[in-house]
Amino acid sequence: MDTDPNLNGKRGLATHAVHAGQPPARPGGPVVAPIVRSSTFHWSGPGDGIDLLYSRYGNNPNQRSVAAKIAALEGTESALALASGMAAISMTLLATTRAGDHIVASRHLYGATHALLSHELPRRGITTTFVDPGDPTAWRAATTPATRVVLIELPTNPTLRVFDIGPARQAARSAGAILAADMTFATPVNIRAAEHGVDAVIHSATKYLGGHSDLIAGAVAGSAELIRAVTKVMKLYGGSIDPQAAWLLERGMRTLPARMERHNRTALALARWFMSIEGVRQVIHPGLTSHPDHECAARMLDGYGGMLSIVLDGGGEAADRFCNNLALAAAAPSLGGVETLVSQPRHTSHVDLSPAERNTLGIRDGFVRISVGLEDLEDLKADFSGAVAAALGAAV
């Protein structure tokens, strides 16, 4: 994508969010680039002096523009927008492995990613060893001569663990593998993962990057070589993003720094408030000093994120009542939107895991994940106070 040459790497994150990926201004040109719905473009051959443009190839003007903005925000050479977060992670893994290869992955992963590694990739001859990311020695111990990818998630979904990237990075380097990271919960506002040695920065752009619960998209950012490889696989599997979704994603990303600042602030305030609420057994948020990874989060992150989790007395039945008695927050299985969204991982993201597997990950019955939106803090407190009261069957 030809972008304004004045927008170099010295510009700030908020400036990149607004301007990166946009064509140079010209008199009479639109301030907001239009949606280009065409699936194909005039091209008679290499003599035309341009690449063959085809929307399935991910090089439609909207697709290229949003990819350039993602790369600018992450501080990487290149990026690619895809049809979903799972398209982003699956295309990345398929592009960097082949039959006989091996992956070392954190045990703390999004449920669908865990299923992809456990059940789908083995059908293609690609095996995975899952490790405890809290054990710094586990990463290198699990690598083999066949290891091609080391995979982490930060913060983790939904337990919000924040593990040091260093041991995973060192294991990847020693094995000659790439370090891939799902950074959906953090966003480039709270951490630019490439600066910590992550080779493939992956997002479910459905969440914070889009930010308005009105699109499905994914993204991967990294070196030009990596993105060419992922693009090649995307062309074969058909995971390109629709131009309209790309346009919506770019629109959402323009306000990402402003939104994340408020998400960060309100979520931390709510987490502190929940600590004093009767019937809430545990509050999980990296900004709390009680969080097991608070020191690591304070050191690595520029903000603690808009996610928090609580565990209610009364187990699953109390959690069901809590979700059924929300008036402002929406009980819905996603996150990162301007509205506050609440879900139970046992019913959604981790439904395919057994109760024992969920307990091992710290996802007990009664666990509720909260994606804190942009509403007024006092209104959210009032809503959650009533829902906790209903969950307990008594006044809070």
Image (spheres, rainbow, N blue to C red):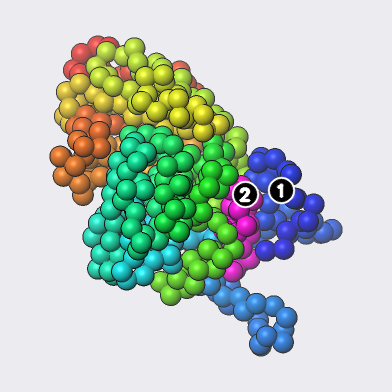
Residue at 54% x, 43% y is: 196
Q: Which residues make up the magenta segment?
A: 58-79
Amino acid under disc 1: Gly
- Residue on which the image places disc 1: 9
- Given residues 100 and 120, the one toward you in this image is 100
Residue 188 magenta-highlighted: no
Q: Earlier in the sequence, mark 2 or mark 1?
A: 1
Is 289 placed left or right of 369 in the picture?
right
Q: Can you tell which mark lies on residue 75?
A: 2
Q: Tag 1: Cα neighbours inside 10 Å, few (<14), some, or many (≥20)?
A: few
Snapshot quadrant of residue 41: bottom right
Instruction: Count every numbered label the image shows and give the total.
Output: 2
C-alpha separation, residue under disc 2 versus residue under disc 1: 8 Å
Snapshot quadrant of residue 392: top left
Residue 362 location in percent, x, y?
Answer: 25, 33
Residue 67 magenta-highlighted: yes
Which structural element holds mark 2? Answer: loop
